[in-house]
């Protein structure tokens, strides 16, 4: 039994893991965990990741959660090219620094646009007032400013002249609002150029493939939502809609 | 420049001192063998902050020489121009190693572990064990840290707890409340400047949010092991315990009905060393002393626009 990666490409961190594995020709079995069908709550998946989240990894009996941990594990196990996670202490620290900051700053904000525009209406039948989206976009704008000023600066990529795990984690997250029509790269030329560079470094075909679902998310408005999923998400939804 | 090292060592040319003996001359400013190079590390810390405590403990425990740069977050020192050059994100902890600056505690901890070649158990070389540390450090952010942060600031706003809290301190907390708590509904700032305590239900909500993560900490991360990753303490335990101490120290006995976690916490304290553990938690354990802190009116005025921007 080889490496298994439990993924749903709707999820940003899943895309990072998928792209990384594919780009580096890491052989794995794609285990589809369909989030809309509530498969992350099934007992079977619970054995792989008791936190009931994707992405998750299973390597023999070894299971692992958290995309950062998964990416780092894969980079070590499969000896991927140095630029992804440099062995130079200071360059590596820059990747770690970004991955840590990413959680509370980009990751928190970027995904909300999808919730507001698609998921909440889908799950509850309610639409939220436009101010809600504006609030979220304003928060994201602050994070994007910090991203440009502190992390990207005038470099081609976050850590220097080559793509790293930092760029990968960032880009998949920022593609989420794009999928629901929030043109965050418009009026941000530096960011836009970086985005193109990252897509090129990943490879256009792989990049587009990984983002097919999110870029066609509007087509999911007719999808059947598992009723149990609604139950599981009720507390989260209540909070978001307050 | 402190002159606490033996005359056998020289001042590294990087530090613009004089070379005394060629055989002892170490050219690299980052050379961990050269005391002068070693003294180049500056750690910008406020021990009120859990991530700062984990960095402090780690450096002390491993005898990593550093200059302690005291930062007082409640006094807004992270907004000074000087600190902005160290960390433009204006957060603590921050590290400065010669021309190299670094933010984010997990990055600082792993940087120090690599540079100073600390004992393996902190951040094991074994891929799977290391992955477990990475997994915890990643999960910790959203699961534990965010709730602890909220609860801390909400508790701080209680007037009965901080009877002499200045308007500024309340205002600051109020603004933080607004910034942190609400993703969906902006709380009004000004009532918090004007003699109102934090809504109790917000505090209760934040405490409830911690219930499941604590359970996951026990069932997924600790299980039946002595420490989170195995038989010995690691960065994961350090980050976890310093965070939980934030609430324990201000009177929230969050581990009350969780004996397994209590035992683990005690084990971590022992592994760190009781003296060091108590020393680093002194500030938070004596939180009430902060009530006597005087904020200059000038600073209040200086902070206002920045604080207002935070919630704009």
Image (cartoon, coloured by chain):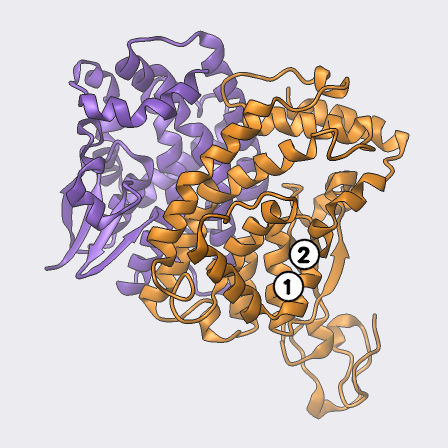
Observer-nearest residue: B88 or B164?
B164
Which disc, if any, is residue B281? 2
Q: Quadrant of the C terminus of chain B?
A: top right
- Is residue A78 visible in this depiction of the protein? yes
- Is residue A82 visible in this depiction of the protein? no
Q: Secondary structure at mark 1?
A: helix
* Disc 1: which residue: B277
Q: Circle 2: is it few (<14), some (14-19), or many (20+) Cα within 10 Å?
A: many
Q: Position of residue A1 (x, y in %)?
A: 10, 60
Is the Cβ of the residue at disc 2 closer than 8 Å to that at disc 1?
yes
Image point (17%, 61%), residue name: A60
Q: Position of residue A131 (x, y in %)?
A: 49, 10
Q: Position of residue A29 (x, y in %)?
A: 13, 50
Residue B263 lies, with reference to residue B2, above or below; the image says: above
Residue B36 lies, with reference to residue A15, above or below; the image says: below
Observer-nearest residue: A52 or A204?
A52
Observer-nearest residue: B228 or B140?
B228
Q: Are marks 2 and 1 on the same chain?
A: yes
Q: Color of chain B here?
A: orange
Q: Color of chain A here?
A: purple
Image point (84%, 26%), residue name: B301
Q: Is residue A35 left or right of residue B248?
A: left
> Alpha-carbon distance for marks 2 and 1?
6 Å
Residue B125 occupies quadrant: bottom left
Image point (58%, 39%), residue name: B149
Residue B28 occupies quadrant: bottom right
Chain to which the residue tagged by mark 2 belongs: B
Q: Position of residue A82 (x, y in %)?
A: 37, 61
Q: Is residue A19 left or right of residue B205?
A: left
Observer-nearest residue: B140 or A209?
B140
């Amino acid at each position: 039994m080889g490496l298994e990666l439990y993924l749903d490409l709707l999820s940003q961190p899943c895309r990072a893991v998928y792209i990384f594995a594919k780009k580096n020709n890491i052989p794995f079995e794609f285990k589809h965990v369909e989030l809309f069908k509530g498969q992350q709550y099934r007992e079977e998946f619970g054995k792989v990741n008791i936190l009931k989240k994707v992405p998750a990894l299973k390597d023999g009996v070894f299971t692992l959660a958290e995309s950062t941990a998964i990416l780092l594990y894969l980079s070590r196990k499969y000896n991927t090219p140095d630029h992804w996670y440099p062995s130079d202490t200071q360059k590596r620290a820059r990747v770690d620094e970004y991955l840590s900051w990413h959680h509370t700053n980009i990751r928190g904000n970027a995904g909300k646009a999808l919730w507001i525009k698609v998921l909440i209406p889908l799950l509850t039948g309610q639409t939220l007032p436009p101010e809600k989206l504006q609030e979220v976009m304003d928060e994201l704008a602050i994070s994007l400013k910090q991203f440009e000023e502190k992390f990207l600066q005038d470099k081609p990529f976050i850590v220097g002249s080559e793509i790293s795990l930092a760029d990968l984690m960032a880009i998949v997250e920022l593609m989420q609002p794009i999928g629901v029509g929030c043109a965050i790269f418009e009026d941000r030329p530096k960011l836009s150029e970086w985005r193109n560079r990252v897509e090129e470094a990943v490879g256009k075909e792989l990049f587009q493939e990984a983002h097919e679902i999110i870029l066609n998310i509007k087509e999911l408005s007719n999808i059947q939502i598992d009723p149990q999923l609604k139950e599981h998400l009720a507390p989260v939804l209540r909070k978001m809609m307050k | 420049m402190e002159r606490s090292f033996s005359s056998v060592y020289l001042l590294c040319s990087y530090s613009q001192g004089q070379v005394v003996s060629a055989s002892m001359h170490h050219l690299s400013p980052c050379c961990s063998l050269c005391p002068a190079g070693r003294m180049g590390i500056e750690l910008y810390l406020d021990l009120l902050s859990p991530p700062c405590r984990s960095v402090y403990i780690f450096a002390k425990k491993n005898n990593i020489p550093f200059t302690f740069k005291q930062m007082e977050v409640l006094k807004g020192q992270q907004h000074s121009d000087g600190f902005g050059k160290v960390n433009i994100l204006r957060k603590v902890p921050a590290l400065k190693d010669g021309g190299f600056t670094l933010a984010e505690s997990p990055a600082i901890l792993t940087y120090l572990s690599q540079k100073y070649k600390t004992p393996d158990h902190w951040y094991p070389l074994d891929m799977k064990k290391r992955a477990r540390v990475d997994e915890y450090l990643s999960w910790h952010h959203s699961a534990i840290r965010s709730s602890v942060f909220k609860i801390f600031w909400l508790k701080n706003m209680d007037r009965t707890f901080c009877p002499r809290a200045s308007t500024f301190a309340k205002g600051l907390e109020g603004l933080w409340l607004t910034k942190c708590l609400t993703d969906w509904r902006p709380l009004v700032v000004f009532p918090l400047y004007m003699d109102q305590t934090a809504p109790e239900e917000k505090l209760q909500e934040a405490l409830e949010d911690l219930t499941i993560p604590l359970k996951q900490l026990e069932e997924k991360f600790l299980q039946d092991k002595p420490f989170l990753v195995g038989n010995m303490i690691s960065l994961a335990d350090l980050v976890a315990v310093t965070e939980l101490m934030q609430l324990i120290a201000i009177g929230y006995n969050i581990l009350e009905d969780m004996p397994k976690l209590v035992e683990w916490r005690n084990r971590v304290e022992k592994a760190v060393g009781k003296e060091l553990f108590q020393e680093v938690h002194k500030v938070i354990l004596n939180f009430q002393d902060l009530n006597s802190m005087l904020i200059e009116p000038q600073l209040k005025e200086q902070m206002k626009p920045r604080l207002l921007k935070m919630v704009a």
